[in-house]
Image (cartoon, rainbow, N blue to C red):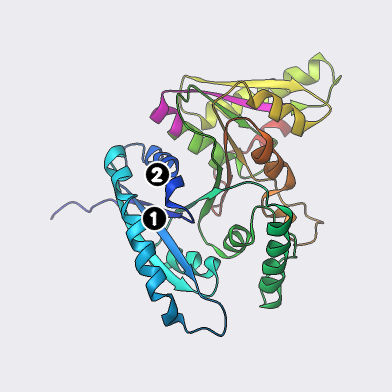
Amino acid sequence: MAPTRKRPYRILIPLANPRTARDLVRIGAGLANGRPTEITALGIVEVPEGVSLSEGATQARTARRLLQRVLGFGDEEGVELRTLVRIGRHAADGVIEAVGEEASDLVLFGWGGPPSTAQAARAEAEATEFALAGRRGGPRPVFSPTIDAVVRESPCDIAVVKQRGLENVRSILVPVRGGPHAELAMRIARDLSKRFKAKVVVLHIVPAGIGERAIARQQAAVDAFVREHAGMRRASGMIAEANSVRSAIIKEAARHDLVIMGASAHPTNAAPDGRYLFGTLAESVASKAKPTVIVVKTRQAVGLATFEQLRAS
């Protein structure tokens, strides 16, 4: 009997601008880590309500031509890359449908940064429209209404990339606070460290002045977390004292070439609004840190011990 072919790891990359695709494809290819991997570059054509969806056909042809330029990036990285175009009322619906059709394991978004005042006003209006249409969540988008809507509905892992270049990645910073998404952040850091031949530094921030014994306990927990999740020699744990977690991460990020962090854990008593899809800390770090930042959110059950569990042991 012929051996069963291993199911490939499938990555979906929604592209608003194909010119930003190269680094996203590099990241996707870096996650292959020797396993069969398929990457789909997705173009979305939005057609307003009241206009026939067939009106989007011309734009779809243009989108397909633009996406053809992306195919060469797959050849450069040695991965299977194909393109797909969807026509719909909302970009998020097109992404969610594609996730289901493609059986995607990961959606890799590029994020342009905080919107301008005019863009923010449009984002608020779009997010309100999603809420009125019966989707969960409030009107305040964390990254963008499209990304936030996909995070709410998508059954797979999500990674949001604030792109600032991926040249000469020698050091990867992974801030951990104890949330369940740190495991995915570590897995992605491990894979990309092999791709770029980079070291990994796992950072945990503690309150200033907690004392040497408390710091030693935290360091032991970080070291155990690194041993359990990193699976590589070029990984180390680091404790830093600071009054502001946000400022400390942004300051340390300047010493590295790539930051990968998990979304904040959802507080058990928090209202189910957009602020806790990723957490305002993640958005702030992605906005202000010097290197490229990848923020991840998992849909998988956490298997190995989280840093929070190790810290409490």
Q: Position of residue 208 (x, y in %)?
A: 84, 22
Residue 201 among those drawn in magenta: yes
Tell me the quadrant of the picture where the C terminus can be found.
Answer: top right
**Number of numbered discs visible in the structure rendering:** 2
Q: Relative to the observer, which residue lies in front, 116 or 234?
A: 116
Q: Which residue is mark 1?
A: 41
Answer yes or no: is residue 112 visible: yes
Q: Relative to the observer, which residue lies in front, 101 or 311?
A: 101
Q: Secondary structure at mark 1?
A: strand
Q: Secondary structure at mark 2?
A: helix
Q: What residue is rendered at 52% in x and 61% in y?
A: 155
Instruction: Identify which amino acid the numbered label 2 is placed on.
Output: Val
In the image, taking residue 143 as reference, residue 228 lies left or right, namely left
**Depicted 69 relative to depicted 139: above or below:** above
Q: Which residues are magenta?
A: 192-204
Tell me the quadrant of the picture where the N terminus can be found.
Answer: bottom left
Q: Which residue is mark 2?
A: 25
Residue 31 lies in what quarter of the image? top left
> Which numbered disc, 1 or 2, marks the residue that appears first in the sequence?
2
